[in-house]
Amino acid sequence: MTFARVALLAAAFVAAAVFSPFSSAGSERVALSVAIDGVIGPASTRQLEDALDAASTRGAEVLILQLDTPGGLVTSMREMIAAILASPVPVIGYVAPAGGHAASAGTYILYATHVAAMAPGTNLGAATPVEMGGLPSLPGGDKDKDEKDATGRPAGDAMMAKVTNDAVALIRSLAELRGRNGDWGEKAVREAASLSANAALQEHVIDFVAGDTTELLRLADGRTVDVGGKKQVLATKGLRVETLEPGWFIRLLSVITDPNVAIVLMLIGVYGIIFEFTSPGAVAPGVIGTICLVLGLYALNFLPINYAGLALMLLGIAFLVIEAFNPTVVLGLSGVAAFLLGSAMLLKTQGPGFEVSWAVTGAAATVTLGLALLTGTYLWAARRSLPRVGSEALRGLPAEILDWQGGEGHVLAQGERWRAKADEPVAPGDSVEVTDIRDLVLTVRRRDAGRNGARQ
């Protein structure tokens, strides 16, 4: 009887699982959508990876990747392409809304998607790699760029030729993988060519033009795509679309990964820690400084930084801090120069939205130098001012003779009774001046004698 009851309960659980409205077999089919709006960077990569994880976990039919971007970092773009190629869920690239574009890095990402579409009034292209980061050219240093080599490219531009050829190989491989126009992709890289939505359709760069997500899913329905090496027929018609909004961490990451914001955070962190060391017990500057410094270093960890540039920036800050406590002028000027050079060299590559602003770095260097000079001025004034504590503080102060016998007696100085001696005759009631102190015995002289000596 007991065994029969157990079997009956087990059967009831199995039936409940099979016919439950929350079971995967009866769950509502859905298409998830994520919008990449703005520059391509570490935050965009994290947003796409989270969206792909959510689509895989929830068993979504497709993930709609809506693009409206001027481009961004090559490293982030390649990470996003790798995530799309490894995704178990088909990704539909969709350039929208009207007036949007998928320029530079956005073009590569669109080529990588399983299905590519554009909204009317959008464009894509201009995928030429941007100039490598580094020091700005000197006046008159662009003369060599006008000279051409045997291939017609600017002489001495071998590095950019390598980067361009690598970009061409990438976009051609993506075109071959997805069956798109590789020749136009190469043209977009080498000549910065661009296309409108209809022109992209005619050039077989995209699969179709769709006015909204409903039309997008209808036109994508029935298409066969390669997902993880396996052919899959899309069944997207009539799917409910659910938009995935970026969380607070992604929003924070999109702000702090701006190299200018990261530089400012690091400066605030350094200033806060220095203030905490110089004024122990303030607490707030140390806490805020530590948080800002960690955030700044965390942001730089996501960026393709040149560690030589970062080292120069930190060295410049160190020189300016030393200048504040030991004014030499040379360290101050060297610190500003090192900070500016490090800022120029900070990023290995630069893209739209990831340029180091000279206005920000110049202002930061000026403020740092100003604080160093201000601190140095106060320290120099403190060194030249008279001591306010200890035995040295008594030198030059007035005193009054209380009693005197021979060459010794007692005086009243700063409201206290002191033993004193003098090398000249004085009498009780005379006004004297302290010239020295040794073993708690003051050496005094007549104040009128000091003035007469000064006149002579």
Image (tube, rainbow, N blue to C red):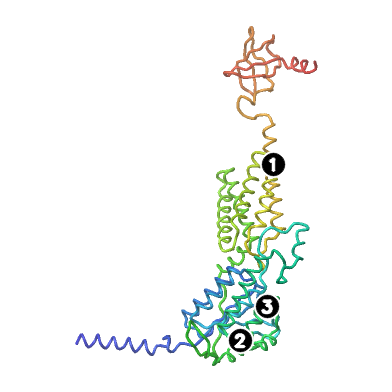
Residue located farthest toward the top when viewing the structure as drawn: 406
Question: Residue 350, labelled with which disc?
Answer: none
N-terminal-most mark, 2 or 1:
2
How far from the left and from the top, in percent, is residue 69? 65, 75
Give the residue displayed 36% in from the left and 86% down from the top: 17
- Position of residue 51 measured from the top left corner of the image (x, y, whole percent): 53, 76
Which residue is label 3 attached to? 188
- Residue, disc 2: 213
Sort mark 2 into few (<14), some (14-19) or many (20+) by Cα contacts within 10 Å: some
Query: Whole-percent x and y of residue 126?
Result: 69, 76
Does the residue at mark 2 contact the one at mark 3 (Cβ under 8 Å)?
Answer: no
Q: Secondary structure at mark 2?
A: helix
Q: CA distance from mark 1 to mark 3?
A: 50 Å
Amino acid type of the residue that numbered disc 3 sits on in the rendered structure = Ala
364 vs 451, nearest the viewer: 364
Tag 2: amino acid: Thr
Q: Residues within 10 Å of mark 3 (few under 14, many from 20)?
A: many
Q: Quadrant of residue 434?
A: top right
Which mark is first along the chain, 3 or 2? Answer: 3
Q: Residue furthest front?
A: 150
The CA distance from mark 2 to mark 3 is: 27 Å
Instruction: Look at label 1 and name its amino acid.
Output: Val
* Label 2 to label 1: alpha-carbon separation: 63 Å
Q: Are marks 1 and 3 in contact (CB under 8 Å)?
A: no
- Front of the two marks 1 and 3: 3
Figure quadrant of residue 390: top right
Q: Position of residue 59 (x, y in %)?
A: 47, 83
Q: Secondary structure at mark 3?
A: helix
